Image (tube, grey):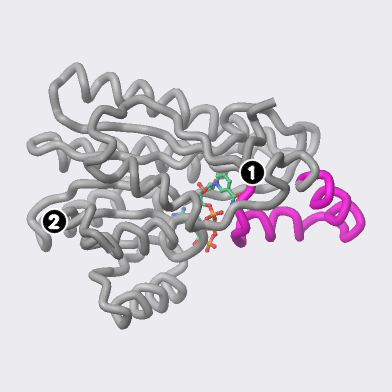
Amino acid sequence: MSGRMKGKVVVVTGGASGIGLASAEACAAEGAVVVITDVNAALGDAESKRMVAAGLAVEFRHHDVTSEADWRRVVDDVVQRHGHLDVVVNNAGIAVIAPVEQETLEGWRRTQAVNMEGVFLGTREAIRAMKARGGSIVNISSIEGLVGDPLIPAYNASKGGVRLFTKSAALECAQRGYGIRVNSVHPGYVGTPLVANAIGALPAEQAAVLQQDLLGRIPLGRLAEPREVAQCVLFLASDESSYVTGAELVVDGGYTAR
Ligand code: NAP
């Protein structure tokens, strides 16, 4: 630990698991006060207690990113308790396998609500809290926001939306002189419950073929570990990326390089 995030207050949504959890841990290990938020209160509480026991400054708040009222409550509470907010990592997301012909309007809207509207609300509330002293907003998109996949059209649409929304917000913050940078991260396949659950919902034979096919399409030949994505989030969250805004950081083992 070298204190790269010392003095910063960070909110990570979907921080109870996977990439969010690893990002929270990476920021806290570098000296930040980190508030992890999630709909999974039992896991969020347990993980924050584990990190506190390891000497890190981590708190948990129950928070549904689709709720405007939850966002206001969480951000106001963080600013009141800690005096300021410096980084928001809009990470919470869901992935449901449903090709266009099988997708329901309800399912489509749910994916957009969590993955895209959640990022909109988080970005808007972060700007409200940060515009007086600057900060960094990191939106977790995906390689699925860069290239299509026939199995997950709603997810593709949501992550593509996050990619361009991020650039729009970055330009607005720059134009207004807020000192807030806004960037997107585009992980490839990462070993987290999100991927395991999506693939696990398929019939066993189809799941095995998909998994094998997937590995064959990743030039580095393996899934990413959450901490490998977290290091990129940490870079964008820290002052080391002070001239980076409106950018998309791809972390995909070479998947989209072809
Ligand atoms: P994960 O392990 O499933 O963690 C996501 C967390 O977000 C879970 O704790 C989940 O709770 C929570 N969550 C779901 N809906 C929420 C809501 N409405 N409000 C607040 N929290 C909510 O997933 P992950 O793989 O780390 O994914 C994190 C982000 O990275 C997502 O945006 C995902 O799309 C993106 N991403 C993942 C991959 C990958 O390969 N894993 C690749 C590219 C991008 P529940 O478990 O209770 O639903």
Please provide percent x and percent y for residue 150. Answer: 76, 33
Q: Look at 48% across and 57% down and name the residue there.
A: 227
Q: Is residue 148 left or right of residue 80?
A: right
Please provide percent x and percent y for residue 164. Answer: 45, 23
The numbered disc on residue 107 is 1
Examine the rendered structure and indicate whether residue 64 appears above or below residue 241. below
The amino acid marked with disc number 2 is Gly
Examine the rendered structure and indicate whether residue 135 appears above or below residue 21. above
Give the residue at mark 2: 7
The amino acid marked with disc number 1 is Gly
* Residue numbers of the magenta segment: 189-214
Is any part of residue 72 visible from this angle?
yes
Q: Look at 22% across and 54% down and name the residue there.
A: 5
Q: Secondary structure at mark 1?
A: helix
- Foreground pick, 202 / 56: 56
Q: Look at 80% across and 43% down and name the residue there.
A: 216
Q: Secondary structure at mark 2?
A: loop
**Outermost residue toward the right in this view:** 205
Examine the rendered structure and indicate whether residue 142 appears above or below residue 203. above
Which mark lies nearer to you, 1 or 2? 2
Q: Look at 31% across and 82% down and name the residue there.
A: 53
- The answer to which quarter of the image holds residue 208 is bottom right
Is any part of residue 106 visible from this angle?
no
Please provide percent x and percent y for residue 184. Answer: 42, 34
Q: Is residue 69 left or right of residue 150?
A: left
Verify whether residue 112 appears in magenta.
no
